[in-house]
Structures are given as C-alpha cells and as structure tokens.
Amino acid sequence: MESDSEATSCVETIADVVTENSHGGMYQVVMLAISLSILQIGFGFVTPVFPVYITELGMGGIELGVLAASFALTRIILAGPLGGLSDRIGRKRVLVFSLLGFAFANVIYAFAQDAIVMIAARALEGAVSAGFFPAANAFVSDMTTPKNRGTAMGYLSTGNMVGFVVGPVVGGVLAEYLGIRLPFIIAALASLLTMLLLYLLIQEPIKKATEDGRRHPKISFKEVLSRAYVAYGALGVAMFANMFAIGVLEVAFMLDAVARFGIGPLEIGGFFGVIGIFMIIGNIVFGKLSDIKGRKWLIVLGAIIGTISMLMFAAATDTNAFYLAGAVLSLGMSMRGPAIQAMIADLTNPKAYGSVMGLFGAISNSAYVVSPTMSGYLFDLNGNAISSLFIAGGVSLAGGFVAAVALPGDGSSLTEIKTEAVSDTIEVQ
C-alpha cells in the first residue's frame, strides 16, 4: 500500500509540474535555443580553422583525429556524472558553469603553440560540454510533454544549427582575412555572452515536493533502463550511427577535400553553412512531424538517407558535389536527431532525465572518439577518405536496421512504457 501511495504521489507531482510549467515551458525552450545559437556561433567560428591551424603546427591526420577524440573522450567519461549532477543541483547551475569552461578553453586555443596544448584545451572543452548538452536536453524534457516534445527538441536543435550555419561562415571569413587565432578569442566572448543570457532569461524548472517531504526522490538508474532496455539499446545504436559520420567528415574528408580540391577555411565554412541551413529547416519540420506521425520511422528513414549521403561524398569530384552530399546528410540527420532525443525523453522517468541524457551523450560521443581516430589513421594510410566514408555508410545503415527491428511503435507499446516510466519511484540502493 505504501508503494502504491508513493507511486500515486509521484504521478500527481509530475502532473502538477507539467501544469505549472506549461504556460512558460515553450518560451523557456525558445530562450534556451537562442542562447545555444549564440554559443554555437562561437563554437562554429573555429570549425574551419582547425584543419589549417593543425597543419601550421605540423600535425597530420592522426593528430587531428586525436584532437577530435580527446574532446569526445572527456564527454564520454563525464556526461553521465554531470547529467546526474543536473538532476540533483538543477539544470541552470550546470549550464552556467559549463559555459564559463567553454570560454576558458577557447582562450587556451588562441595562445597554443603545439599539439599537446591544443589537445589539452580540446579535452577541457569536451569536459565542460559534457555538462552543458545533457543538462540542456534534460531542461527541454522537464518543460515539455510527449505531445510537444519533438517540436521542442526541434527548436533546441535549430538553435544549435543557427550557430552551426553562422559560426563556420563568419569564422572562415575571419580566419581568411584576420588570421587563425582571432576566432578563438571571439568564441570565448560568445561563451561569456551566452552565460549571461542564460543567467538572466532561463528559469530553473519547478520541482514539487512529494507527500513525505522529499523534493528530489531518487530513482534507480538500473531500474529506469530496465523498463525499456531493448528500446534504449536501439536508440543508443541509432545515436551512435548518427554521430559517426560527423567525425569522418571533420577529419578524413576535410583533409581529403583540402588535398583534392584545394579548398581553404572560407570553403569549409560554406560547406558547414550548407549543412546547417538544411538542418535548421529540417529540425523544425521533422521535430513537429515526429509529434504528429511518430518517431520510429523518421529515425529509420534518416539512417537510410545518411548512408546515401556517405556514398555521395565518396563519389564527389568537385566542390559542388560535396556541397550536395552535405545537404543530403543534413536531411537525414534532422530526421533522426530530434526524434531520437524526444523518444529517449518519452521513455524516461522525469526524475532521471539528466542521468539518462548524460548516458546517451556518452554514447554519442563514443562515436566521435572512434570515427575521427579511425578516419585519421586510414587517411594517413591510404591518402584519401574513401574507405572511411564506406565504413560510415555501413554504420548508418546498421543503425537504421536496428531501429526498424527493435524500437517500439508509436502506438500502445510505447504508451505502456511511458506509463511505467512515470510510475517508477524505486529508491537508489
């Protein structure tokens, strides 16, 4: 009887939280998305700079791969703990302190003179982002319901992509005409501006106390995952596959394109700008579509389109062809991304959003450890990116197959899992 009473209390608490947050929930999501777009503009400034910067420092493909992997490795280690920290101390605190770390890392980049310092700064950047992105996704989950969660995740991804479009383009121009170190200083200033906006505009989601007086009843992480372990596993594979291609593009294909097409920071910035523009549109459209039509088949179709884009990159013979491949890739990623994030939140007890988002952040970034390191090594070995692109296409296709077979449909089976997630109030042992 005590367990039933506790479960009922939890369900009522969650309903109260949704009701109190609903009026301003989407507004808060939009404010977070705007703040994220400013951060990502600063983050994107440096994207077209890295391939040129590491060349000037005497680094090759494997070093660039280690640079990218160091970022992802610290995110893997810290995403879960920092996501759980946001469950305990609040989303806003974690977001603010993470942004301060971003600014500090970019200052280190600006004055780096060798590969070791660059890798250390990149590792620091990964560590602080391990707190920011799980907390941001958990914040959106707190402020939404399954009926509008895909739309909200689309808004958050759109804020991310606005920065992804503007940042590389502006960074490419700055690097072309003002040097390759200035973008890092501007990125640090953008991080500080984002921190100020978050502090002023974002309110911590309301958390009600339960009947026995506890404000933050703990949930067994193992029990949360066991409620839908097959679905969580399939979503983990889908997320890994979605991220895998980015590491290949940022390392092997960018080096390949510099060698074959003679492109510089301006063209690289334009390439990522094309991807970002298509993803801005796609995240909004497909995020909303996932609320209306369901998540599963958008994830599957996005994986197939991602595979096609990798084959297009492999066959590219000029800049127009790889720009077109980038547009196709962005279409597939915008189908998968918001739908994956929304389904994770659909399946998860609200008290464990931060921890679960942190776990999936670690999965995503494990792809960003494997693919840059692998593709950098294969580029040094073969002198091109073809083998890496074929591997990335195979990984994407495998992710789509697993999603098609193992993810629950968007009908009664998913509803049953959602109900169990909300009702789960098991204490951490």
Image (cartoon, rainbow, N blue to C red):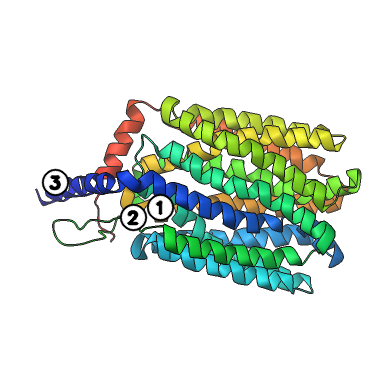
Do the CB atoms of the residues marked 1 and 2 lie less than 8 Å apart? Answer: yes
Q: Is residue 340 something that shows in the picture?
A: yes
Mark 3 lies on residue: 4
Q: Quadrant of the C terminus?
A: bottom left
417 in relation to 181, above or below: above
Tell me if mark 2 has few (under 14), some (14-19) or many (20+) residues whose alpha carbon lies within 10 angstroms of its own: many
Residue type of the residue flagged with mark 3: Asp
Disc 3 secondary structure class: helix
Q: Earlier in the sequence, mark 1 or mark 3?
A: 3
Residue 399 got which mark? none
Position of residue 285 measured from the top left corner of the image (x, y, whole percent)? 53, 31
Gap in Å between the C-alphas at discs 1 and 2?
Answer: 7 Å
Mark 1 lies on residue: 139
Horizontal side, residue 308 vs residue 336: left or right: right
Horizontal side, residue 235 vs residue 226: left or right: right
Horizontal side, residue 315 vs residue 44: left or right: right
Question: What residue do we see at 81% from left, 63% from top?
Answer: 178
Residue 57 image-quadrant placement:
bottom right
Q: Earlier in the sequence, mark 3 or mark 2?
A: 3
Disc 1 secondary structure class: helix
Residue 111 image-quadrant placement:
bottom right
Gap in Å between the C-alphas at discs 1 and 3?
Answer: 28 Å
Disc 2 secondary structure class: loop
Q: Is residue 140 something that shows in the picture?
A: no
Q: Nearer the viewer, residue 336 or 238?
A: 336
Position of residue 121 measured from the top left corner of the image (x, y, whole percent)? 66, 69
Question: What residue do we see at 60% from left, 32% from top?
Answer: 303
Q: Nearer the viewer, residue 39 or 102?
A: 39
Mark 2 lies on residue: 205
Tell me if mark 3 has few (under 14), some (14-19) or many (20+) residues whose alpha carbon lies within 10 angstroms of its own: few
